[in-house]
Every structure is written in C-alpha cells, then in structure tokens.
C-alpha cells in the first residue's frame, strides 16, 4: 500500500504545479464504515493525493447513515455542500440529478479514468446522458447452490444456462427428495430478485428503461406480463421450502446455511449471512458452496452478461472544483480498488481490480461485474419507493398465487403513472 502511494500519479487532470497554485479544499461526505480498516485506507489515499498535488486539501467527514440521509438534502441546497458525497444510486440519485444539484463530470474525466471502469460501472451513476459520479463497489445477485445436495440429486448446476434447464433442475431435485429453492417470501424483496432477474432476461435493460419512461405500455406491456407468467410458473412447481411465505430473509439464509435447500437466489452478502444464520454459526464450507449466474430465458431480449444488484459510489455536486473529479478518479483507480479487494472491504468494480480478491466467490462476482454489459440496480431502489414497493408486492403475490400476471403488470404500471 505504502509503495503504491509513493508512486507518481500519472495521467491525472491536474499537474502538481497547477494544484499547488490552486490552494483548493475538496470536501467529501461519507457514511460511517463498519470495518476498522476502511478509514485508514481512505486516509492513506487522501495523503498520497495531497502529496502529489500540493495545494489541494482533501477533507473527509463521516456520518452515520440516518444523519447522513437527514442532513444531505439541506446541504445540497446550501453553500456548505460537499464536493463529493456517498450515494446508494437509484431513485434518489435520479431525483438529485433532475434537481440540478449534481455536476456533469464526463468532460472533466481523463480518458485513463474512464477506461479504468466498465460501461456498466459508469452507467450506474449516469443520468440523461450525463456522468455525475462513479461507482466504488457493487453487489450481484447470483444463484448460490449446495454442491453436496446437487450431487445427491445428480445435478450439475454449472451446466445450467437457460431458464428451462433451471426449472428442469428444480424438478429433478424434488424427485430426489431435495428442497429445490429456499426463499424469504415474508420480506417480499427476496422474491423481487427473481421477478427482476426474469425482467432483465426477458425484456432486457432497454425494456426496463423504456417501461420506466412509460413507453410500450410501461410495466403493463407484454414483456412484463411474460415476466409474471414465468414467476407464476416457477411457483406452481412448488419448489420452495414449506412455509416460505412466513419466512423472512434471515430464516431463509439460515436454512441454506444449514444445508436445507439446493439453491438460494441472493446477493454476494449471502456468503457470510448464510454462515451466521445457520444453526452452527459456521454454515456451508467453500467446498459445499457454488454459484452460477441467473439463467437466460429463451427468446428474451436480455444480454447474458448483464448483471443485477446494488451499486454504491460517489456523486459530485454542482460547480465542484475540478480537483474533486481528479481525486475521485485517483481514489477509484485500479491500484486503490485492488487494495480494497485484497483487504476484503468490498467487491471492487474497477477493471482488473479483482486479482487480489482472496475469496473465490467474491472474485468470480467481481469478474462478472467487470465484464457486465449493464448492471441493473435493484428495482425496488431504481424505480423509487412507490413503484419499487409495488414490484415487491406483486412479486410476493405472484409467488403465493394471490394475483395474476396481467394484474401484477397493471399494478406496477399504475404505480408508475401516479408516482
């Protein structure tokens, strides 16, 4: 870490001689971190940048989540606003972009900076053709599986590439006396993962964006009716554990950790959560664990490399000094992101930053994200509270047989129209 911090910072927008004359203060507002090593990590990056850019003073302030969320709207409208601030992306980011409180940093980013990140990574903090920030880390929803139960059922999950093959595997598992799929239906959002992944495979990224804009019938369009039909079809197979609509996420991930189900469609955080939620507190070993990408739906418009999950990063405020963009590019470059991955702070998204990620599953997910053509943010975040909440509701209702695919599609579109 110290060695790379001493290196000359080639390719930055501001040469040391220029920044020395600027005497610029760059304020960055972040949420508190639960990891003891993260603050020293950021402090080392701050020191390295300041050493290479005399006259630029990076000031990082940390706040707890709730204080951050409460204080930020007022700050963004004031002269005391930070130059850079943490963001979860999605609907709130879009509202901030529409409100005009964010800077278009695209023209200020060097070619080297842009090249260090995938289109999907950059796209997570772009709105209406303008780049307002950059991603720092991401989460991907994948299909986790139990290798021992797969062997018992005679299934090779790595051979599953299509939705039909996945459904066939569920039937095979049932026939072998194995619970095919665990899910926390009570919390609804775990079921929204299945709905959303089906949408990404069936209508594709463009279809989701078009629906959000009210085009082609919006979320009541034919493609989203088909999404509902496929989720309904899945549920009709009765692949879930008994009482799945009364089980929350914590219960479901504990069951998976206890080896009570073959598959669990969940984000990368489930690797640790399933261990902690298990009866033993240890969960499955790495040898008992595997993951695959969500399968493609035959005839769908989606791209097989498209990923789904969360993206967290940083936004730059309107009229921030160019030094803020320069620092952001340095902070999120390949070397610094590689260090974060090696330390286990998060799954980095910069190209080539997965090399030092020790956890084999995190490494695979990191590579998936780096090669992603498009990373779709959780729909219950991306679409805003009203529409996103309705997506969660209809996902649960489809899984429990409480609504039809047509009704579900119309409910989501109605929420979009009146949001």
Image: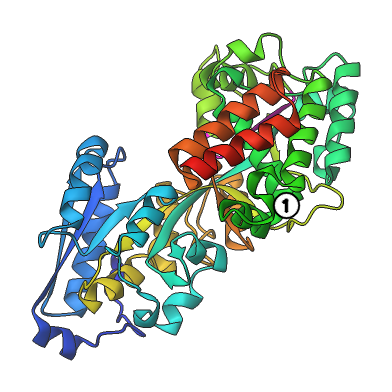
Instruction: Name the residue nearer the viewer: 50 or 416.
Output: 416
Quarter holding residue 7: bottom left
Query: Which residue is at 59% across, 56% downward?
Result: 209
Which residue occupies the foreground of this view, 244 or 9? 244
Which of the colour schemes (rainbow, by chain, secondary structure, one colour) is used?
Answer: rainbow
Over which residues does the magenta segment extend?
Answer: 262-269
Residue 227 lies, in percent from the top left, at 74, 40
Quarter placement of the N terminus: bottom left
When asked about the image quadrant of residue 78, the answer is bottom left
Query: Magenta span has 69?
Result: no
Query: Which residue is drawn at the image coordinates 10% and 62% (left, top)?
Result: 79
**Residue 190 lies in quadrant:** top right
Whether 304 is drawn above or below 13: the answer is above
Give the x, y percent position of residue 163: 83, 41
- Tell whether position 267 is magenta: yes
Using the image, determine if residue 332 lies above or below residue 211. below
Residue 262 location (% of width, % of height):
75, 25
Question: Could you say which is closer to the camera, residue 243 or residue 136?
Answer: 243
| Residue 285 visible here | no
Q: Residue 339: x, y in percent?
A: 40, 58
Q: In terms of secondary structure, where does tag 1 sit?
A: loop
In the rendered view, would you say 1 is above or below 385? below
Seen in the picture, residue 321 relative to 195 is either above or below; the reply is: below
Is 342 left, or right, of 330 in this rendering?
A: right
Q: Residue at x 70, y 23 (%)?
A: 403
Judging by the rendered image, the residue that carries numbered circle 1 is 203
The secondary structure that most of the magenta stretch takes on is: strand
Q: Is residue 248 left or right of residue 63?
A: right
Q: Alpha-carbon neighbours of circle 1 within 10 Å: few (<14), some, or many (≥20)? A: many
Left or right for 215, reference 126: right
């Amino acid at each position: 870490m110290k060695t790379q911090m001493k290196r000359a910072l080639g390719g930055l927008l501001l040469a040391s001689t220029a920044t020395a004359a600027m005497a610029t203060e760059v304020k960055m507002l972040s949420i508190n971190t639960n990891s003891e090593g993260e603050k020293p990590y950021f402090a080392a990056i701050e020191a390295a940048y300041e050493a290479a850019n005399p006259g630029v003073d990076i000031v990082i302030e940390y706040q707890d989540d709730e204080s951050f969320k409460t204080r930020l709207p007022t700050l963004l409208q004031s002269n005391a606003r930070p130059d850079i601030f943490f963001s979860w992306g999605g609907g709130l980011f879009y509202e901030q972009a529409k409100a005009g409180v964010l800077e278009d940093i695209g023209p200020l980013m060097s070619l080297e900076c842009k090249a260090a990140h995938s289109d999907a990574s950059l796209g997570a903090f772009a709105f209406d053709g303008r780049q307002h920030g950059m991603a720092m880390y991401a989460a991907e929803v994948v299909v986790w599986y139990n290798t021992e139960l797969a062997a018992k059922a005679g299934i090779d999950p790595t051979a599953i590439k299509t939705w039909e093959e996945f459904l066939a595997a569920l039937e095979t598992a049932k026939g072998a006396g194995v619970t095919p799929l665990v899910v926390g239906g009570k919390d609804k959002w775990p079921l929204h993962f299945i709905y959303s992944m089906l949408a990404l495979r069936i209508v594709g990224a463009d279809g989701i964006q078009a629906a959000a804009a009210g085009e082609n019938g919006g979320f009541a369009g034919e493609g989203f009716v088909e999404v509902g039909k496929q989720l309904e079809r899945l549920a009709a197979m009765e692949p879930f554990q008994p009482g799945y609509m009364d089980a929350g996420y914590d219960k479901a991930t504990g069951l998976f950790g206890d080896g009570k189900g073959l598959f669990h469609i969940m984000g990368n955080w489930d690797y640790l959560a399933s261990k902690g939620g298990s009866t033993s507190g240890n969960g499955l070993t790495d040898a008992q664990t595997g993951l695959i990408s969500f399968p493609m739906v035959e005839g769908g418009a989606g791209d097989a490399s498209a990923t789904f999950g969360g993206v967290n990063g940083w936004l730059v405020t309107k009229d921030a000094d160019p030094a803020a963009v320069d620092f952001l590019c340095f902070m999120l470059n390949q070397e610094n992101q590689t260090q974060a991955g090696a330390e286990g702070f998060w799954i980095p998204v910069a190209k080539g930053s997965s090399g030092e990620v020790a956890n084999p599953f995190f490494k695979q997910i990191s590579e998936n994200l780096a090669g992603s053509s498009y990373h779709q943010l959780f729909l219950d975040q991306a679409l805003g509270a009203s529409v996103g909440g309705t997506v969660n509701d209809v996902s649960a209702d489809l899984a429990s047989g409480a609504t039809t695919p047509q009704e579900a599609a119309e409910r989501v579109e109605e929420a979009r129209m009146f949001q």
